[in-house]
Image (cartoon, rainbow, N blue to C red):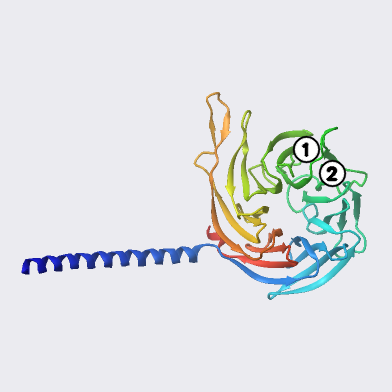
Amino acid sequence: RPAVAAADRVRLAERARELASAMSTQDHSQRETGADMMNKPQIIEHARKAVTQTVYETRWVPCSARFVVLGSPPRGTGLIQIYNLSRGEFSLLHEAEKPSPLKCGTFGASSLAERRLATGDFTGKLNIWDLENLAAPVFAAQAHAGLLNCIDGVGGLKGSGAPEIVTGGKDGSVKVWDPRQADGPVASMEPKPGDVARDCWAVAFGDSHSASDRVVAAGYDNGDVKLLDLRAGKVSWETNVQNGVCGLQFDRQDIEMNKLVVTTLESRYRLYDMRTHHPTFGYSMLSQEAHESTVWGVSHLPQNRDVFMTCGGNGSLELWKYAYPAARRVKDRDGHEKGVLGSVSKLQKTTISTQPISSFDWSADKEGLCVMGVLDQTFRVALVTKLSKV
C-alpha cells in the first residue's frame, strides 16, 4: 500500500504539471488573440442619418468634408443633397429635386477647381451639375433608352488624357462621353444586331497612364465582362463569370492595368491580374466567396491599392488585402507568359444593416474615412482604423 500511495502521488503531480502547462498555453494564446484583435483594422460607424428617400449613390466632394447623396423620394422624383460633416454631425447645405430618380454619379471627369458632378437617371439622361448652382445642368445628353445604371469618370481628378465619362444602360450599350463635346458620344459598345440586349450593370475606367491609353471594363447581368480598348477602338478581351456582375473596379485608374475586381451575385467576387495576358487562358483569376450574399460593389482604398472593401446584400462590409506572389508571371511549355495570382486575406468584417449597401466611397483626403448609402433609407459615415499598418 505505501508503494501504491507513492505511485498515486507521482501521477497526481504529473497531472498537476500537465494542467498548469495547458492553462499557461491557453493564457498565452488568449493574449496573442487579444493582441491580434488590437492590431487589426476596425470598422467604426461614426454617424448615420435616416432620410425619407431611397439612397442610390453617395460621393465625397473632392478635397472637402462635404459629400453628395443621390436618390429618389417616395413620389418618384430625383433628389440631389449636399451635406457637410462636422464633429460627427451632418448639416444639409443644399438640395435640389429633379424630375427623374437619380441612380449614379461621379466626380471623376471634373477638375479639382470645378468639382462638377456627373449623374445618370432612370430615364437614361446624363447630366453634369455645378454644385454652386443646381438649377440647371451645365451638360445634358440623352445617353440611353431607359435606365442609366452605372457611371464612371476619368481625366479630371485622376488619369492622363481628356476628361471622359462612361455610362452603361439597361439598353445594353456602353457609351463614352467627352463633356466638351455635346453632339454625342465619342465611343460606344452596342449589342450586335439580332442579339438580346443584356443589361449593363457596371462600368469602370482603367489603364489611363498616358494621353492615348485608356480602357473601359463593363459588366452585364448575364455575367459577361468586356474590356473595350479605346485606343484601338475594339473589344480586346471578354469573359463570362457565370453570375450577374454587380460591380467592378480597377485598383487604380491612372496606372498601367494592374488588378481588376469583379463582384457578382451568389456571394462571390473575382480578382484578375491584368498585367499578363495569355493567348489561350487570358488573364489569371482567383475566385473568392464573400458576404454569404450578393456582393453589390467594390471600392479600393485610394492610399493603398492592395486594400479594398466589398459591400454585401446582407448589409455587411468586408475589408480585404491582396498579397502579391514571389513572381507575377511564368512561362508555359510553349514559351507564352502566364500571370501568377497572389492571395487575398480578410482583414475585418462588420454588419451595419439588414438591407443591401448600395454605394460606398472612400475619402481620398483622409485615410479610412468612408461614406455609404444603404437601402434602409439611411446613409452613414464610418472610420476604418489602422490601415497604415496592414
Which label number is shown at residue 230?
1
Judged from the image, the secondary structure of the residue bearing numbered disc 1 is loop
x 70%, y 35%: residue:
238
Of all residues, the one furthest to the left in this rendering is 2
Image location of residue 359, percent across then percent down: 72, 58
Tell me the amino acid under the disc marked 1.
Leu
Query: In this rendering, would 226 be left or right of 7?
Result: right
Q: Residue at x 43, y 64 (%)?
A: 33
Q: Residue 355 vs residue 176: left or right? A: left
Q: Who is closer to the viewer here, 294 or 113?
A: 294
Which quadrant is home to the N terminus? bottom left
- State the SS at label 2: loop
Label 2 crowding class (10 Å Cα cut-off): few <14, some 14-19, many 20+? many
Q: Relative to 346, is 1 on the left or the right? A: left
Check the image and name the residue furthest to the top: 334
> In which quadrant of the rendered view does residue 26 lie?
bottom left
Badge 1 crowding class, 10 Å Cα cut-off, few under 14, some 14 to 19, many 20 or more, is: some
The residue indicated by pointer 2 is 171
Using the image, determine if residue 255 lies above or below residue 335. below
Q: Earlier in the sequence, mark 2 or mark 1?
A: 2
Residue that appears at 78% across and 38% down: 230
Furthest residue to the front? 1
Real-space Cα separation, disc 2 to disc 1, in angstroms: 21 Å
- Residue 211 placement: quadrant: top right
Q: Of 352 and 66, which appears nearest the observer?
A: 352
Q: Position of residue 322 (x, y in %)?
A: 56, 49
Residue at x 86% of width, y 55% of height: 128
What is the number of callouts on the image? 2
Please tell me whether residue 75 is drawn above or below residue 324 in the rendered image. below
* Amino acid at pointer 2: Asp
User: Dividing the picture into quarters, in which one does residue 378 lie?
Assistant: bottom right
